[in-house]
Every structure is written in C-alpha cells, then in structure tokens.
C-alpha cells in the first residue's frame, strides 16, 4: 500500500506571483522594438529601464514552476502511477498547446515575411518549422514553453535524487549555480551554441532554487508571509538584504545595458550574464514575498484582478505577441524621438494585457476544448457543478446551525 499522502496547504497567493511575472514579460516584449527605434529619444533611459528592469519574468516563471512541482510532489510516494499521471497532464496541457500554438505562429511568421499570400514552398518551410519546433524557436517567446518541457522531462529524475539525499537538498542551490555557470563558461569558450537560452541548463539555478524553497517551505514561510511590522529583527534584516540586493543588481543591470546601447560601452559577456542572473534570482524571491504581502493586504479589488491575471498567465503568455504584432502596425505617424512615442510604446503593454486577458478568458470560459490551444482551464472559469454547489450549501448551513 502507498504511504498516506500529506495534504498540502493551498497557496492562492501564487496566482498573484504569476500576475507579477507576466507583467514582467509584457513590459519586456512591449519595449523590445523601442530599444532600437527610439535610440535618439530623450526618454531612452525610461525605455531601456522598462526593457531591462522587467526581465525577471521568464526566470521567475521557471522558479515558480519548480516550486509548485516540488511543493506538490516531494512528500508523495514516487510510484509508476504518479509519474504516469504527471506526464499525461504535461502531454495534454503543455506539449499539445505548444505544438498547436507553434503552428499558429508558423503562419504568423510567414505573414510577416510576405509569404502567406504567395505560393508557399512547403518543402522548404516545413523543415524550418520542425527544426524551430525542436528548439522552441517558431516565435520569439516560445522558448519558455520549450524550456518548461525539458524540465518536465527531467523532473522525475530530480525528484528521485532529492528525495533520496538530504545532502543534495541542502546543497541544491549551489549545485544549481555550478551547473548553470559551468555551462555558461563552457559555452562561451568552447561550445559557442548560439541559442543557449533555449536550453534548460541555462536556468538550472532558478530550477533548483525553486526546488529547495518548496522542500523547505515551512522553514521560510513565516518570513515570506509576515508583514514588515510583524517580522522579527532577524527577519527584517533578511528582508532588507533581499530587497536591497535586488535593487542594486537590477539597477546595475539596467545601467550596463544603457551604457552599451546608447553610449557604445563594451563589457565582457560574462558581466551581462552575471548581472542578469543576480537580478533575476533576487527577483524570484522578492516576487514571492511581494505576492504574499499583496495577498494579505486586504485590497480585495486589486487581489481579485491580479489573481485572475495570474490564472490566465499561461494563455496570456502564449497569445500576447499576436496583439503586439497587430498593435505595431499602427504607429499613426509617430516619430520615435517625440514624447508621445513613449506613451504609444507603453500603450502596447497595457493593451496587450487587457485585450489578451479578455480574449483568452472568453475563449477558455465559453469555447469547449480551448485547453488544447491555451492550456488547462482555471478552476474559476470551469462550469459550476450544481450537485457540488448544493452539497457545499448544505455543509455551510450545517456549520452555521451548530455554531461553527
């Protein structure tokens, strides 16, 4: 018989984390063109700031994916049935959407290259599609889903190793950094693999940091969830170090790219790697603490909005480039050096969030089978089960009658 499964506490604040992470992604993608087009704008520092400061999005999603996996699976018996169900869910809700959305963006790319309305040479284009599919490159953002698939393949192995050795758990974070930086240095001096950002090993520090925090969550929970006024002196010192280190790394990361893009300064590529790594590693934990603070803030309207954005974050991630592609077709004659260009650029971020969120919510809620393209349907958008609702009402009324 299987050992009794420990019932884990549900962490609804993680949807707020997802919302903060997707906002990071949208800022980066909305400003990507402007970092080139608006080089002569007097607001270029702001544009560069938005583009670099918010680069925490994808690494934070990787960290959170690992955290959720190990939080939910670490205390469960490692059985064939568990692994089979794990892979089945990822096949249905991640791999299938990745394949179908890659087909969508294959045609988007053809349209961008002016090939959609002409006679398509399938013998040339199909091999390109499958090659890009195997590397997560059918569109600029799909590398994240491709990386996630790599981690899902590796997850049972990591789970088995970490369940079998407390030593590996204790040293998981240093091991993650060693693996990631070992590959970075190896690639720089020997491999020269051009698209290393599509390989899971490039994010191993985030993955094992998420695993470590999930396994030891009870140890850090009070610090991560307590408001500033309720923290002990030691916890406040840790919070100051965390947020101070985050701001230092983030602002230095912003500055090095500003110097490079606008002033032509040149730095060793390892400096860019280091600052990006430190900035985003700090961000992963900062977002965890910020999400808890927001969830416990009592700001019901903001919490509700962020929770819904978080629930839709995967679908928003998949679909938002379609809106940005359309939005950028209409610059209304704006000159990148004028002040209103900055408003137009940020308008891309705002509208990408609103339009995409409304669209995917409608699709997931009202179109049967939409999960095959956009991933699993959030619980809040699934049709209500009348029988289950009636049972819940009876339970609630029963509790009231006995004074619970």
Image (cartoon, helix red, strand yellow):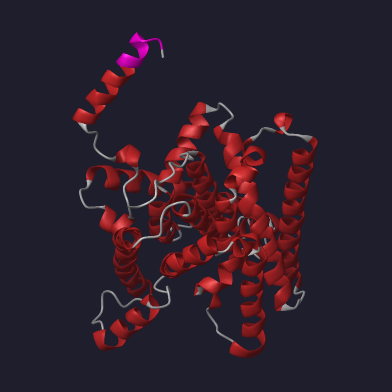
Q: Position of residue 210 (x, y in %)?
A: 56, 56
Q: Residue at x 43, y 77 (%)?
A: 135
Q: Position of residue 89 (x, y in %)?
A: 31, 58
Give the magenta range. Answer: 397-403
Which quadrant of the view contains residue 358? top left
Q: Residue at x 40, y 10 (%)?
A: 403
Residue 398 is covered by the magenta coloring: yes
Question: 255 or 329, which is in the foreground?
Answer: 255
**In this picture, is 73 found above or below 140?**
above
Instruction: Say which residue appears at 24% left-offset and 33% top-offset.
Output: 384
Does the stretch in magenta take in 149? no
Q: Is residue 201 visible?
A: yes
Q: What secondary structure is the stretch in magenta mostly built from?
A: helix
Q: Position of residue 189 (x, y in %)?
A: 67, 88
**Front-most of 347 and 53?**
53
Residue lying farthest to the front in this orientation: 1
Q: Quadrant of residue 265?
A: bottom right
């Amino acid at each position: 018989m299987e050992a009794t499964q420990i019932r884990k506490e549900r962490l609804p604040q993680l949807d707020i984390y997802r919302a903060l992470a997707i906002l990071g992604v949208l800022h980066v993608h909305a400003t990507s063109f402007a970092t080139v087009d608006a080089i002569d704008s007097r607001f270029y520092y702001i544009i560069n700031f938005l583009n670099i400061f918010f680069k925490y999005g994808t690494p934070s999603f990787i960290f959170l994916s690992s955290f959720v996996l190990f939080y939910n699976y670490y205390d469960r018996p490692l059985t064939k049935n568990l692994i089979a169900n794990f892979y089945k869910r990822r096949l249905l809700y991640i791999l299938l959407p990745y394949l179908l959305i890659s087909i969508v963006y294959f045609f988007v790319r053809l349209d961008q290259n002016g090939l959609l309305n002409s006679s398509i040479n399938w013998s040339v284009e199909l091999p390109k599609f499958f090659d890009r599919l195997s590397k997560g490159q059918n569109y600029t953002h799909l590398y994240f889903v491709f990386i996630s698939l790599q981690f899902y393949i590796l997850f049972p192995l990591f789970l088995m190793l970490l369940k079998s050795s407390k030593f590996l758990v204790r040293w998981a974070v240093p091991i993650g950094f060693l693996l990631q930086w070992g590959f970075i240095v190896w690639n720089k001096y020997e491999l020269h693999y051009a698209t290393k950002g599509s390989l899971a090993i490039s994010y191993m520090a985030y993955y094992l940091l998420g695993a470590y925090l999930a396994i030891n969550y009870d140890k850090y929970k009070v610090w991560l969830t307590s408001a500033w006024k309720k923290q002990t002196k030691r916890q406040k010192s840790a919070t100051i170090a965390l947020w101070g280190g985050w701001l230092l790394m983030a602002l230095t990361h912003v500055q090095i790219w500003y110097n490079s893009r606008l002033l032509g300064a040149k730095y060793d590529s390892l400096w860019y790697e280091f600052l990006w790594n430190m900035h985003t590693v700090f961000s992963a934990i900062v977002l965890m603490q910020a999400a808890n603070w927001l969830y416990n803030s009592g700001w019901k309207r903001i919490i509700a909005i962020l929770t819904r954005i978080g629930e839709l974050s995967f679908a928003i991630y998949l679909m938002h480039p379609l809106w940005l592609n359309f939005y950028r077709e209409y610059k209304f004659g704006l000159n990148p050096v004028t002040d209103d260009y900055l408003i137009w650029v940020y308008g891309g971020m705002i509208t990408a969030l609103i339009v995409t969120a409304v669209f995917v919510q409608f699709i997931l809620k009202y179109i049967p089978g939409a999960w095959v393209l956009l991933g699993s349907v959030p619980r809040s958008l699934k049709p209500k089960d009348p029988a289950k609702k009636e049972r819940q009402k009876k339970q609630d009324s029963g509790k009231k009658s006995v004074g619970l």
